[in-house]
């Protein structure tokens, strides 16, 4: 009876992909409603430079609010040491920094090569340990890059080890581009875990090509224990109309609960949380199959097994 942690990343990854700003009160209602369903961890926003992403300007207020919700692990994304300082000040339980495995992608996006990024990770890690805040590194574009194409597995393994040496406590493999396939997920998770063991806990998957759930299952079979997902697959994919952004939380919870794995999440209650998104973001498509089909007739027998 293993417990799989679902980390809701919609308030960060979902919202940052859309231009419309969701009102603070709606974000609070969304976060509170998911926490009440048993979602154990929520990435509430990103501490990017103020002004760069208006959608994320209220992250500090959301952290303060989310900290009042009992039992919830409150995490935020930090792009650099400055963002980490703001996250710590706001009171996060944990923070994660993205580290692009494609050096071209890293230079184009944040104007930092791998050596410079590792220095940044070291600075964030020092702040985190001084403040007693958990710090994870998300190895992004780990399964491929829209500029470089394939990213060598040896590069990912080497930079995973280097991230831990720089002070990260936990690692995630991110399929930023939706390039991953299940065989690749198995290979890469196995290769990284062979070097870093249980420090690799998490997969951050995008459903760009419809392989999200298959990739999640492949990761679970290799020892992954945390999966990122976003309610309604919010954010979509700009290159693939009809494709959700992240894994759809509702479908992922259905799969895991029905398989007899434990998520601690009340799925039927979670389905009703979509109303908050639909009302606050009326023009945004929401994805997922379970919300339309409902649960199987014998769903409750399955989860009781
Ligand atoms: Zn993402």
Image (spheres, rainbow, N blue to C red):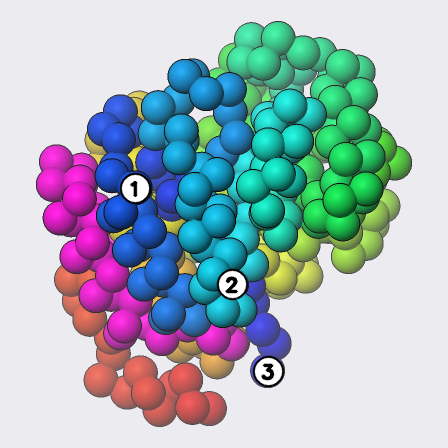
Q: Are marks 3 and 2 in contact (CB under 8 Å)?
A: no
Q: Residue drawn 25% across and 61% down?
A: 273
Q: Distance from label 3 to label 2 (Cα)?
A: 22 Å
Which mark lies nearer to you, 1 or 2? 1
Q: Image height check: is 176 above or below 216?
A: above
Q: Residue drawn 83% across and 48% down?
A: 196
Q: Is mark 1 within 8 Å of ligand 1?
A: no
Q: Position of residue 67 (x, y in %)?
A: 51, 56
User: How many numbered circles are shown?
Assistant: 3
Q: Distance from label 1 to label 2 (Cα)?
A: 19 Å
- Residue with the mark numbered 1: 24
Q: Residue drawn 28% across and 87% down?
A: 298
Q: Image height check: is 104 above or below 22?
A: above
Q: Can residue 173 be seen at all in this image of the molecule?
A: no
Q: Residue drawn 40% across and 29% down?
A: 57
Q: Position of residue 208 (x, y in %)?
A: 37, 36
Q: Position of residue 76 (x, y in %)?
A: 54, 41
Q: Earlier in the sequence, mark 3 or mark 2?
A: 3
Secondary element at image label 1: helix
Q: Are marks 1 and 2 in contact (CB under 8 Å)?
A: no
The answer to which quarter of the image holds residue 84 is top right
Task: Specify the quadrant that holds the N terminus.
Answer: bottom right
Q: Residue furthest right?
A: 165
Residue 1: mark:
3
- Residue with the mark numbered 2: 72
Closer to us: 98 or 91:
91
Segment tinted magenta in the rendering:
262-290
């Amino acid at each position: 009876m293993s417990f799989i942690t679902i980390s809701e990343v919609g308030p960060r990854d979902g919202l940052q992909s859309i231009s419309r700003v969701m009102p603070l009160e709606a974000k609070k209602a969304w976060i509170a409603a998911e926490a009440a369903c048993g979602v154990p961890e929520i990435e509430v926003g990103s501490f990017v430079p103020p002004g760069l992403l208006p959608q994320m300007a209220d992250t500090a207020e959301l952290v303060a609010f989310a900290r009042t919700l009992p039992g919830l692990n409150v995490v935020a994304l930090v792009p650099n040491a400055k963002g980490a300082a703001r996250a710590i000040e706001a009171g996060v339980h944990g923070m994660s920094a993205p580290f692009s495995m494609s050096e071209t992608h890293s230079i184009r996006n944040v104007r930092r090569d791998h050596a410079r990024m590792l220095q940044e990770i070291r600075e964030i890690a020092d702040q985190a340990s001084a403040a007693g805040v958990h710090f994870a590194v998300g190895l992004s574009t780990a399964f491929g890059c829209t500029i470089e194409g394939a990213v060598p597995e040896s590069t990912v393994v080497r930079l995973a080890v280097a991230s831990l040496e720089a002070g990260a406590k936990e690692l995630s493999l991110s399929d930023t581009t939706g390039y991953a396939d299940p065989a690749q997920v198995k290979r890469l998770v196995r290769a990284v875990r062979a070097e870093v063991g249980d420090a690799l806990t998490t997969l951050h998957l995008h459903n760009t090509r419809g392989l999200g759930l298959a990739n999640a299952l492949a990761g679970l079979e290799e020892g992954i224990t945390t999966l990122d997902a976003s309610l309604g697959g919010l954010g979509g994919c700009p290159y693939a109309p009809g494709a959700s952004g992240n894994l759809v939380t509702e479908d992922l919870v259905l799969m895991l609960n029905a398989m007899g794995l434990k998520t601690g999440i009340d799925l039927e209650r979670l389905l009703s949380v979509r109303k908050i998104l639909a009302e606050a973001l009326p023009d945004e498509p929401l994805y997922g199959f379970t919300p339309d089909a409902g649960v199987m007739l014998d769903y409750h027998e399955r989860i009781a097994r």
